[in-house]
Image (tube, helix red, strand yellow):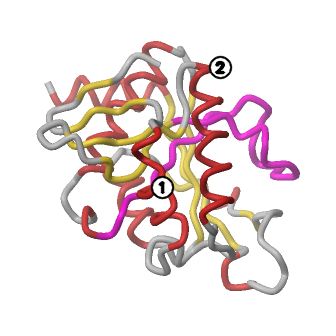
Amino acid sequence: MKPIRTERLILRNWEERDRELFHRINSDERVMEFFPFRRDRAAADAKMDEFRAWIDEDGYGFAAAEIAATGECIGFVGLLETEDIEDIDVLAPGTIEIGWRLAPEFWGKGYVTEAAEAWLDYGFETLGVDEIVSFAVHDNHRSIAVMKRLGMRADEGADFDHPSVPDSHPHLKRHVLYRLSREDWTARKRAAC
């Protein structure tokens, strides 16, 4: 993956030096509030290796977000095909998702929105996709606020119960789905100029 630079960030593939941060964001109670699991170090290392391999193979994925001025990795933001999630009827094969996860000390600083805007540009301009989606637990107001800031629109008729969430966590099953079309993204970019 060729790194993507934004005003304050570098979006890049994962490096060995990122393992501690990756484990922390996958085991932190605040970060993982809307997930039914926490990853121990071995599981986090395996998932980071998986993310790195996807990026090596596809040229994009859930990439490391690094503060350009300090070189500090703060979490991830990126695009990913949803094919590994089975049984979500509202998503067509090949659907591209935008997602993120940051360490709590970096919340509220606009990093996710800044990085996500760059990834939307990449998805629509470089990959040429017609639509990018995002989804989250219906009570995850922070992520939903980011989706709205990105110009994504709720597809209320497409809310779904996530098949990967076990019945032991019923409060995490219901997910909202937001969509952004290339046309809406292009109109939004023109309006901003």
Disc 1 residue type (three-letter): Phe
Percent of width and height locating residue 46? 68, 49
Nearer mark to the viewer, of 1 and 2:
1
Percent of width and height locating residue 111? 25, 50
Percent of width and height locating residue 17? 40, 44
Percent of width and height locating residue 109? 19, 59
Work out which quarter of the rendered image holds the C terminus and state it. Answer: top left
For image coordinates 47% across by 25% down, the residue present is 182
Residue range in magenta is 79-104
Residue at disc 1, secondary structure: helix
Question: Which residue in the protein does label 1 denote?
Answer: 22
Question: Which residue in the protein does label 2 denote?
Answer: 57
| Residue 99 part of the magenta segment | yes
For image coordinates 75% across by 84% down, the residue present is 170
Against 65, residue 2 (above or below) is: above
Disc 2 residue type (three-letter): Glu
The answer to which of marks 1 and 2 sits earlier in the sequence is 1
Residue at disc 2, secondary structure: helix
